[in-house]
Image (spheres, grey):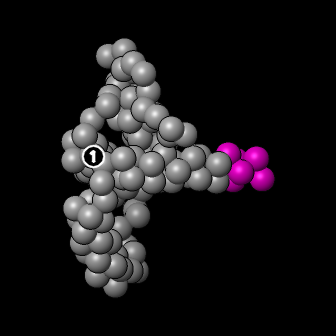
């Protein structure tokens, strides 16, 4: 088909490199998804393993960002109130993700993942060039 998984896994060091790039780009521009997704997609995981790995990677990255963000003064009353106001949308998004995960067959899940990864990559390149 048009969308096929990688034929072979990336070498072990690639995971460390992808994690470092994902962490750095997540800290600098909140754009750590593509490097993590490219690596995780190469591992030929099931959709559940892929989604769980993505959640774990970004949980770890976000925990690691807490201290530097606090040091930079990013947790102000205004930002915390905005966080509180947006929390219901985050919960709704998480619920929608669980619902979609259960609903979508594995092939459709990965097809959508590849399309969204391509769109995200194109948007990041566009932003970088403009």
Give the image location of residue 34, x and y in percent. 48, 43
Residue drawn at 34 percent across, 79 percent down: 89
- The answer to which quarter of the image holds residue 75 is bottom left
Left or right relative to 40: residue 124: right
- On the question of residue 80 being in view, the answer is no
Residue drawn at 24 percent across, 68 percent down: 99
Depicted 87 relative to depicted 59: above or below: below
Query: Front-most of 22 and 67?
Result: 22
Depicted 55 relative to depicted 94: above or below: above
- On the question of residue 44 being in view, the answer is yes
Left or right relative to 83: residue 5: right
Membership of 8 in magenta stretch: no
Depicted 129 relative to depicted 7: above or below: below
Give the image location of residue 8, x and y in percent. 39, 18
- The answer to which quarter of the image holds residue 17 is top left
Query: Front-most of 89 and 103?
Result: 103
Query: Front-most of 66 and 41?
Result: 41
Residue drawn at 32 percent across, 16 percent down: 12
The region drawn magenta spans 125-130
Query: Which residue matches tag 1?
Result: 47
Residue drawn at 32 percent across, 31 percent down: 44
Membership of 127 in magenta stretch: yes
- Which SS does the magenta portion mostly show? helix
Extreme-right residue of the structure: 130
Q: Tell me the element at label 1.
A: helix
Give the image location of residue 19, x and y in percent. 37, 33
Give the image location of residue 106, x and y in percent. 30, 48
- The answer to which quarter of the image holds residue 7 is top left
């Amino acid at each position: 088909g048009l969308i096929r998984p990688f034929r072979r896994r990336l070498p072990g060091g690639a995971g460390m490199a992808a994690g470092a790039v994902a962490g750095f780009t997540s800290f600098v521009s909140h754009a750590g998804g593509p490097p993590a997704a490219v690596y995780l997609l190469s591992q030929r995981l099931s959709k559940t393993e892929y989604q769980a790995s993505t959640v774990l990677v970004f949980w770890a990255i976000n925990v690691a960002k807490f201290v530097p963000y606090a040091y930079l003064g990013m947790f102000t009353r205004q930002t915390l109130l905005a966080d509180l106001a947006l929390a219901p949308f985050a919960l709704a998004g998480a619920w929608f993700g669980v619902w979609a995960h259960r609903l979508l067959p594995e092939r459709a899940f990965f097809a959508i993942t590849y399309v969204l990864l391509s769109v995200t990559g194109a948007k990041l390149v566009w932003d970088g060039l403009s």
